[in-house]
């Protein structure tokens, strides 16, 4: 749960009555990189009948999320003085070839769809190369981020990427590369008729007066680790993913209050207070 929302909800419930069940608030570390905090807690034997991951959903109930796989792509060249570029092989130019091909492939991915999660996606989000402004670079590195929808296997996504790189190699004999996978988090899905889904839908309706929209989280989160341990999980919280990682991130105060109220109703219903 979101820190402020969830703590406020638990305080409100405890001030009203004694819980008949247990509620755990987990403030986990490294959730965006590895999920290490959640995985560590689960490895210690902690569990539950249901869970909520407090990502920014705009108070919408989300029952699925995309997976992610990331690779580090290196292209190799030959160093030379920039006054004689023909004597070298520019690794940045080789990476540029790969970037253009991968951009075209990312556009083709839009043709694949999932009823909740839409289309998979791919982007190049970091790139670096060269060591001096008068030296032809012999190395360039980039990170490739690929979002997976249910039904897509990481092995198949990697095979598609390798086919693209091998295609460049066939056209350009000087294209030398290395592809290294360094992260993979699968997608996950909770059944729409699960108790946690029905409970939080009811809580949202009690607070907002409206039937909640059930959808899916475009990004990746710790839900997969919980679901893999047999804990039915939803994603729910205040704020918007559209503002994530942008300048001046913010959450509407009214949404924070509503989220806390919804969490409180969920706790009461789930524990039978």
Image: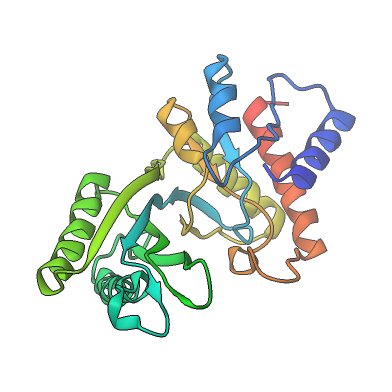
Q: Is residue 86 above or below residue 128?
A: below
- How many labels, in total? 0
The quadrant of the image that shows the C terminus is top right
Q: Between 216 and 221, which is closer to the camera in this rendering?
A: 221
Q: Position of residue 157 (x, y in %)?
A: 24, 53
Q: Is residue 262 above or below residue 245?
A: above
- 135 displayed left or right of 3: left
- 259 displayed left or right of 44: right
Q: Residue at x 47, y 68 (%)?
A: 130
The quadrant of the image that shows the N terminus is top right
Q: Can residue 218 be seen in this view?
A: yes
Quarter occupied by residue 111: bottom left
Q: Position of residue 243 (x, y in %)?
A: 64, 68
- 111 displayed left or right of 219: left
- 6 displayed left or right of 43: right
Q: Is residue 39 above or below residue 140?
A: above
Residue that extends furthest to the right in the rendered view of this protein: 15
Q: Which residue is drawn at 26% across and 58% down?
A: 177
Residue that extends furthest to the left in the rendered view of this protein: 170
Quarter occupied by residue 251: bottom right
Q: Between 168 and 75, which is closer to the camera in this rendering?
A: 75
Q: Specify how the rendered protein is coloured.
A: rainbow
Residue that extends furthest to the bottom in the rendered view of this protein: 83
Q: Is residue 48 visible?
A: no
Q: Between 45 and 11, which is closer to the camera in this rendering?
A: 45
Q: Is residue 162 above or below residue 203?
A: below
Q: Where is residue 258 in the image (x, y as percent from the top left)?
A: 75, 55
Q: Where is residue 253 in the image (x, y as percent from the top left)?
A: 82, 62
Q: Which residue is drawn at 41% across and 41% down?
A: 190
């Amino acid at each position: 749960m979101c820190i402020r929302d969830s703590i406020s909800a638990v305080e409100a419930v405890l001030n009203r009555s004694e819980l008949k069940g247990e509620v755990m608030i987990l403030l986990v570390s490294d959730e965006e990189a590895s999920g290490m905090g959640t995985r560590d807690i689960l490895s210690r034997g902690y569990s539950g009948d249901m869970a909520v991951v407090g990502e920014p959903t705009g108070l919408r109930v989300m029952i699925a999320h995309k997976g992610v796989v990331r690779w580090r792509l290196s292209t190799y060249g030959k160093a030379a003085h920039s006054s004689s570029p023909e004597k070298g092989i520019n690794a940045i130019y080789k990476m540029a070839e790969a970037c253009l091909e991968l951009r075209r492939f990312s556009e083709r991915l839009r043709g694949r769809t999932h009823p909740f999660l839409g289309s998979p996606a791919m982007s190049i989000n970091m790139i670096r190369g060269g060591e001096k402004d008068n030296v032809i670079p012999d190395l360039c590195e980039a990170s490739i981020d690929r979002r997976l929808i249910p039904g897509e296997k990481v092995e198949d996504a990697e095979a598609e990427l390798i086919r693209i790189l091998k295609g460049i190699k066939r056209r350009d004999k000087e294209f030398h590369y290395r592809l290294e996978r360094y992260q993979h988090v699968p997608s996950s899905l909770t059944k729409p008729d699960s108790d946690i889904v029905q409970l939080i839908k009811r809580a949202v309706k009690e607070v907002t007066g409206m039937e909640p929209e059930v959808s899916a989280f475009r990004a990746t989160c710790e839900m997969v680790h919980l679901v893999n341990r047999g804990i039915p999980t939803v994603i729910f919280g205040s704020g918007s993913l559209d503002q994530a990682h942008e300048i001046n991130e913010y959450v509407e105060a009214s949404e924070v209050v509503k989220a806390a109220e919804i969490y409180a109703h969920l706790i009461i219903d789930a524990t039978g207070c």
